[in-house]
Image (tube, rainbow, N blue to C red):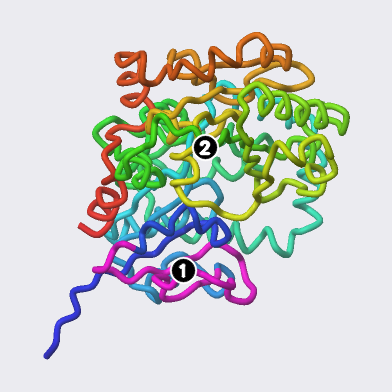
Amino acid sequence: MIMNDRKRILLVFNTKRQELYSYLGEDLSSDYYIIFTESGEASANLPSFIKEELFWNDYRTPFHLLNAVKPDGVVFQEVFDLKQIALNIAAKSKNIKTFFLDHGIWNDFESIKKNDLSLKSKNRRRKLGKLNRWHKVIPGYLFYFSAIRGIKTKNFGKFFVLPVIAFFKSLLTSLTKNKFPERKPDKFILFSRHNYNTVFHYYGCTEKEIVYTGFPFYDALANEQPILNSNDYIIFIDHPYLEHHILGWDECFHENVAKAIAEIAELSGKKVKIKLHPRSNKALWEKYEFLHDKAEIIQQPVSNNFYLNGSLIIGYASTMMIGFICAKKNVVLLGWHPKPQIFGIDFSLFGICHKSLSFSEVKSKFLYWQSHNLALQNEEAYQKFVEYFNYPFDGNASQRIIEIISG
């Protein structure tokens, strides 16, 4: 008799965000299944290591789902909605290992809380929307309450109250006020120490339940030798603020950003490669004739060498910037908005990258930015940055995560 010792892993991940889990394809010892959407046709172009896509509506209860898949482990991108929580409860009751697997950099909890409070003014409309969709909402509640047999008697109160508070107030309020052990995954795999405070407020996890792995997305940046003194080109990383109608952006301000990029090209004597976000409108950039001989507009995916070979990376706060700074690239963090601000985490506070809040600083500071790589110059500050945001940065984060999940 041939024994099959391959692990069966169920991912509860957004199927459309393949970049957040594709590295798990390096695991050659496990079979992966994925679930995210309620129903529908199988997602197109799923990574080949995914054996099958499942749908919530095909299963009456979380126990029904687990009995069908028979996973050795369940990996969550988040455990927020009622079905996800119910699945975690049921899996733990059946002694199936459950994991929370990080997927990016989290905003600090106070910022999230402030945003949640601002949404409460729309709460009445949200509740009416749920009532209008009662035929879809009720099965979710039934799925959740079917997990009750996995709850210890002393935690019944919080189990029952959680969906009630989520309905009448907000999900964030409910999650922070109704923490109970069965709600928590067994292990929290965090990419960054920065994320701990926010994850703690949601789940009440303790340090002993956490493993820090570093960002798997930046393994290649650690493994490939950065070209620190490249003279080829400068990179500007675009964000679709205008397309998303946020932070007061309009077409006039967008054009002013483009003019600042043209000025950078003139001052440096180098071409600026404008890397667009997938949701950016390429036509907005192509219409600027003053950029035609100074910039190259790129929207398709690029290799890590594209970033490693750039002499300077200019862009807004994002998870990507963590990888570039860890690779000791020269970075300028932008706060170019109608109301100047760093929208996101201000990495410049660590002293390892530059910061610009206004277009006028291009003329007065660009030559300094270009000639001073702060990630190289401030070694002690650089080490503190890596330890807090992406430790260990050694190219082995993917393997660490796979060993935890499949071990």
Q: Residues within 10 Å of mark 2 (few under 14, many from 20)?
A: few
Q: Position of residue 103 (x, y in %)?
A: 46, 45
On the image, which quarter does residue 75 sit in? bottom left
The nearer-to-camera label among 1 and 2 is 2
Q: Front-most of 136 and 342?
A: 342
Residue that numbered label 1 is attached to: 47
Please say whether residue 43 is one of the residues in the magenta stretch.
yes
- Residue 135's disc is none
| Mark 1 secondary-structure assignment | loop
Q: Quadrant of residue 313?
A: top right
Image position of 310 (left or right of 394): right
Q: Residue at x 26, y 68 (%)?
A: 28
- Residue pushed farthest bottom? 1
Name the residue at the front extreme: 269
Residue placed furthest toward the left = 1
Q: Residue at x 26, y 39 (%)?
A: 394
Q: Which residues are magenta?
A: 26-55
Question: In this picture, is 332 found above or below 36?
Answer: above
